[in-house]
Amino acid sequence: MDYVAVLLPSLVVGLLFWFAMKSIFNADKAERQAEARAQAEADAQAAGDDFPEPPSKSDK
């Protein structure tokens, strides 16, 4: 039982760090996708197109 008391705080902090980093990376990915959509929209408007194509999944 002593091992659990010693290892549990480190595991909890590690999990909190993992969740924080995961949320940061997900937010960054969503921001980059939104920026790509906005850029594609701006490029389409500059070219005179009415309906721009969304960026494909290979553009990530």
Image (cartoon, rainbow, N blue to C red):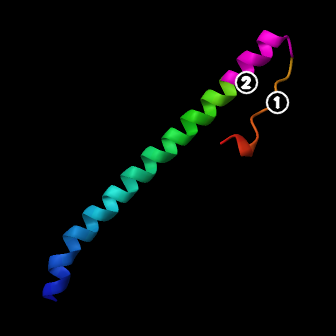
Residue farthest to the bottom?
1
Horizontal placement of 12 versus 31: left or right? Answer: left
Horizontal placement of 51 versus 14: left or right? Answer: right
Quarter of the image for residue 47 reads top right
Q: Return the mark for residue 40.
A: 2
- Which quadrant of the rendered structure holds the N terminus? bottom left
Q: Return the mark for residue 11.
A: none
Q: Secondary structure at mark 2?
A: helix
- Residue 39 image offset from top left, x and y in percent: 67, 22
* Magenta stretch encompasses residue 15: no
Q: CA distance from mark 2 to mark 1?
A: 8 Å
Q: Amino acid at mark 2?
A: Ala
* Up/down of 46 relative to 8, above or below: above
- Which quadrant of the rendered structure holds the C terminus? top right
* Magenta stretch encompasses residue 44: yes
Residue displayed at 44% across by 53% down: 22
Q: Earlier in the sequence, mark 2 or mark 1?
A: 2
Residue displayed at 27% across by 66% down: 12
Q: Amino acid at mark 1?
A: Glu
**Boundaries of the magenta span:** 39-49
Check if mark 2's residue and mark 1's residue have beta carbons within 8 Å.
yes
Q: Return the mark for residue 53.
A: 1
Horizontal placement of 5 versus 40: left or right? Answer: left
24 and 46: which is toward the camera: 46
Horizontal placement of 37 versus 32: left or right? Answer: right
Dot 1, how many residues are within 10 Å of its Cα: few (below 14), some (14-19), or many (20+)?
few
